[in-house]
Amino acid sequence: DHRFLVVGRPIPRGTLDADRDRARARFGIPAEATCLLVFGGSLGARSLNEAAIEAFAGPATSAGAATSMSVLHASGRRDHEVLAARLEALGAPGHYHLYPYIEPFADALAAADLAAARAGGSIFELAAAGVPAVLVPYPHATADHQSANARWMAEGGAAVLVPDAELDAARLSREVAAILSEPGRLAAMSRSARALARPDAADRIADELVALAAAGRAARGRHI
């Protein structure tokens, strides 16, 4: 059908430009650590925020990787103060790095080995950066589009889908541990994420618009 062309969703310019070592130095994440990135958008995702803090911020998490895993958590501004207070009550563990928002987000992607996130437009940035994910779709998104996004990533081998109603600290911990305990699986999911990516989507849209404009001018010229 020539009425539409699927090119993918454009990602922010610079998404793939961040350096992993510099990004980890910025956040204080050791080079040898495995890094879990947790985020839910600018406002955050309360269910994901609470599950992550409970699962990974305590002195003895059930993830099975507390001593070798760093957590980079962009909580969103809405819940940040409450979560920061909970972290402080837990002794502000050094492996847990909490921010309200991370800018540029490319640094967070460069530092991460795995993500736990909602399944909005950021999945295209995850794919481009080769970061596999545990995706928890927002259940009230318009037309349930986040569930469709998460299924696309999961069916492509780049993600695990966890419905929001099934999310708690134990489930999140199990899913993260299952992936990180198998380096081969983590690497395969990263490759699958990159295979799904459309990092040139913005350029393709621009090229197609230029071509359409040129074709329109040519068609008008033939009728003069």
Image: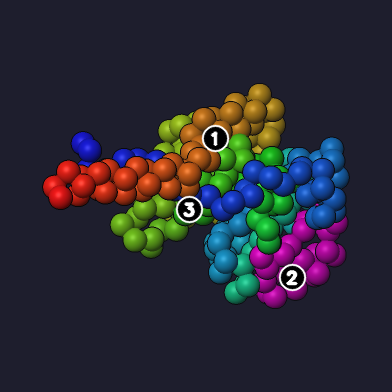
Residue type highlighted by circle 1: Ala
Residue type highlighted by circle 2: Ala
Q: Quadrant of residue 150?
A: top left
Residue 196 on the magenta span: no
Q: Report the residue at 76% width, 44% height from top.
A: 19
Comparing 215 with 169, the one in front is 215
Q: Which residue bears the numbered disc 1?
A: 193
Q: How is the image coloured?
A: rainbow
61 above or below 40? above
Can see residue 56?
no
Can see residue 5?
yes
Q: Residue furthest front?
A: 224
Q: Report the residue at 31% width, 49% height from top.
A: 213
The residue segment tinted magenta is: 80-102
Tag 3 secondary structure: loop
Circles 2 and 3: CB distance less than 8 Å?
no
Rate crowding at label 2 as few (under 14), some (14 to 19) or many (20 or more) other CA atoms within 10 Å: some
Tag 1 secondary structure: helix
Residue 98 location in percent, x, y? 74, 62
Q: Which mark's residue is nearer the viewer, 2 or 3?
A: 3
Q: Which mark's residue is nearer the viewer, 2 or 1?
A: 1
Residue 203 location in percent, x, y? 48, 44
Q: Which residue bears the numbered disc 3?
A: 121
Compute the Cα span from label 2 to label 3.
27 Å
Q: Residue furthest left?
A: 223
